[in-house]
Structure formats: structure tokens, C-alpha cells
Image (cartoon, grey):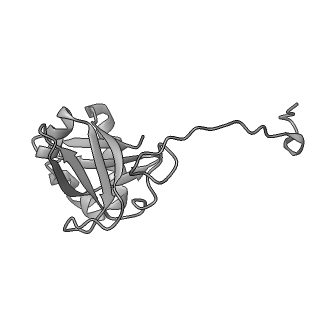
Amino acid sequence: MCNSANPTTAYAVALPIRWTFSRYNGGMPGTIPEAIRGRKYISLTTFRKNGVKVATPVWFGEDGDKLYVMTRSEMGKTKRIRNNPQVTVAPCTIRGKVTGPESAATARILPLDEQSRARQIINRKYWLAWLTSPWSRADAFLEIGFP
């Protein structure tokens, strides 16, 4: 019997937990891969309708188990995500050279009412994004989640 009033007498019951790992991710499901945490850039790979991969180095913000990316609504990556939300992300250099393992993810284009929070998350990480935000033409924000 578990007594929640006195945590020293509580007993833990081991239940089988089933985690599903993709061939890309190496951590718990639903969390940001360790290789990406704290990095400056990620390579966001989207897929064309014919299946061809298109990788783009981007700035990103981290909040909980989600990544946030700012872009413009007419950019190719935004159009490709509208057609296919499946993406991969990997740590990379400013020039896009991948420096770590890829992780499968799902992206969604944020509605207007959720964009200000995403901008704040990105501005916290990159002072240049904060400095230029009054003149920024970024009008779309992506939320990237991990299975």
C-alpha cells in the first residue's frame, strides 16, 4: 500500500514500460536528442513530393521537448512541410555540415496565436534575432516534435 503522506514508506511497483526507438533517435521518446541540445545550428531536412531530401541549416530555440524555428512562409521548407510534416534534424555547422546523428521528427507550422511564444524562445537564445526582430521578415514559425 502506498502512503502518499509519508514518502519514506511509499513502495514503487515496477511496471513494464515499452519505449519505441526510431532508427535515428537514441533517447527517450518525445525528448530532444542529446546531440542537438545546446547547439547553435541544426540541419533541418525536409522532403519534396518526389522524396528527395532538402537540408537547410537553421537557428532554433528549445523549450521542453520541442524545437522552434523561424522562417518565411514562402520559403521552400515551409511549403514542403505543408505537404509532408516528416522531417529529420541533426546538429550542424553554420554552413550546414552535419556534425552528429540525424533524428526523425515531425514539424508543424504554428498558427498566429502561438507565434509570439516561439519568437521569444528563439530571441532568448540568439541576441541577433532579438536585435533584428523589428525588421525581420520571418512570418512563419515551425514547431518540431520528436516521436
2 sits to left or right of 40: right
Q: Give me the residue at 85% from left, 39% from top.
A: 10
Up/down of 101 relative to 9, above or below: below
- Residue 94, image quadrant: bottom left
**Farthest residue, direction front:** 23
* On-image quarter of the C terminus: top left
Q: Is residue 52 left or right of residue 20?
A: left
Q: Is residue 4 left or right of residue 74?
A: right
Instruction: Report the number of discs.
Output: 0
Query: To which quarter of the image does residue 102 belong?
Result: bottom left
Within the image, what quadrant is residue 81 found in? top left
Q: Position of residue 141 (x, y in %)?
A: 25, 43
Please state which of residues 141 and 9 is positioned toward the viewer in this rendering.
9
Q: Please name whichever residue, 19 or 41, is drawn nearer the observer in this view of the structure.
A: 19
* Residue 116: x %, y % from top left: 31, 41
Q: Relative to 132, does residue 66 appear above or below in the rendering?
A: above
The structure residue drawn at horizontal position 84% and vertical position 39%, both measured from the top left corner, is 11
Residue at the image point whose x is 47% and y is 54% from the top = 26
Drawn side of residue 39 relative to residue 71, left or right: right
Residue in the image at 35% along x and 65% along y: 100
In the rendered view of the protein, which quadrant contains the N terminus?
top right
Can you give x and y, in whole percent of width and height, for residue 104 in the image? Answer: 35, 47
